Image (spheres, rainbow, N blue to C red):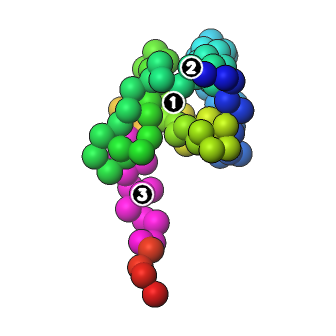
Amino acid sequence: MRLLAPDIPPHVSDVIRRLPPDVKHSVKQAIRALAQSPQIGAPLIGELASLWKYRVRRFRIVYEVDRAHRALRIVAVGHRAVIYDELSQSAKRKPSEQPG
């Protein structure tokens, strides 16, 4: 697979910026590796089934692959103990699209 362009939204950049230096370095290396081979992560299940995860120490990078736009969208970076609950709550807060 050819290199995907990492798409890191501002709120995720802020999280990465606040990580301890050694973890920040590992997360940045992991994002570069994922851009080259997004399948090295593991798919999530349940309500987060459209997303993938990648482990960096006690932290997780949650991402989606947009092959049409050749982008690696980083959805979240956080500690494994809370990241999935936060993503689930965020998904539940989004208004559902109802046919008109």
Main SS class of the magenta portion in the image: helix
Q: Is residue 14 above or below residue 57?
A: below
The residue at the point 44 percent across, 34 percent down is 52
Q: Is residue 7 left or right of residue 59?
A: right
Q: Looking at the image, which residue is at 49% across and 35% down?
A: 62
- Estimate the x, y position of residue 42 in percent, counting from the top left: 39, 26
Q: Quadrant of residue 92 in the image? A: bottom left
Q: Amino acid under label 3?
A: Ala
For label 1, the residue is: 61
Q: Nearer the viewer, mark 2 or mark 3?
A: 2
Image coordinates of residue 88 in percent, x first then y, are 37, 51
Classify mark 3: helix, strand or loop: helix
Q: Nearer the viewer, mark 1 or mark 2?
A: 2
Disc nearer the start of the sequence (2/3):
2
Q: CA distance from mark 2 to mark 3?
A: 26 Å
The residue identified by callout 3 is: 91
In the picture as drawn, the residue positioned furthest to the bottom comes out as 100
**Residue 18: in magenta span:** no
Residue 37: which numbered mark, if any?
2
Q: Viewed as shown, does residue 92 lie left or right of 27? A: left
**Residue type, mark 2 in image:** Ser
Which residue appears at 42% of the width and 72% of the height?
Answer: 96
